[in-house]
Image (tube, rainbow, N blue to C red):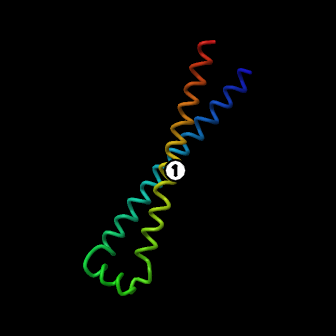
Amino acid sequence: MGTGKTVIVTVLVIAGLLMLALSFVASIIVDNIDQRIADGCEDEAGTIGEALNLDEGQCQDGRDMRDKIDPFGQMIGYLGTTVLVISVIMVAIRKKQ
């Protein structure tokens, strides 16, 4: 059982680190979208263009995408942290035995 547990802990650590990396990438994407919205949609010309639908809905599409990515990235980050904590607990339990 020792080898199997080592493999499981290794897989959990790798999965946890990948999830944290995905969460970090999602936060970068959300920041990029926020910056593009601020630059192109929230100034005077952007507001007028959006009101007259000259932007063809791109500003709202950006906001919708941001609203979808942000909670997903946070959830993946929490899940990755949980997986890493579980792997640390498994290692601590194994060392006690």
Residue 33 occupies quadrant? bottom left
Looking at the image, is 34 positioned above or below residue 27?
below
Residue 80 vs residue 56: left or right?
right
Where residue 23 sits: x, y (%)? 49, 49
Residue 79 occupies quadrant? top right
Q: Residue at x 36, y 81 (%)?
A: 50
Q: Residue at x 49, y 59 (%)?
A: 69
Q: Amino acid at mark 1?
A: Leu
Where residue 80 sits: x, y (%)? 54, 41
Q: Residue furthest top?
A: 97
Where residue 92 sits: x, y (%)? 56, 20
Q: Residue at x 39, y 85 (%)?
A: 53
The quadrant of the picture occupied by the C terminus is: top right
The quadrant of the picture occupied by the N terminus is: top right
Within 10 angstroms of label 1, few (less than 14), some, or many (20 or more) residues?
A: some
* Numbered marks: total: 1
Residue 5 occupies quadrant? top right
Q: Residue furthest left?
A: 44
| Disc 1 element | helix
Where residue 25 sits: x, y (%)? 47, 53
Q: Residue furthest right?
A: 1
Residue 72 vs residue 93: left or right?
left
Looking at the image, is 65 positioned above or below residue 96?
below
Q: Residue furthest front?
A: 51
Q: Residue at x 51, y 48 (%)?
A: 75
The residue pinned by badge 1 equals 22
Q: Nearer the viewer, residue 52 or 18?
A: 52
Looking at the image, is 89 positioned above or below residue 56?
above
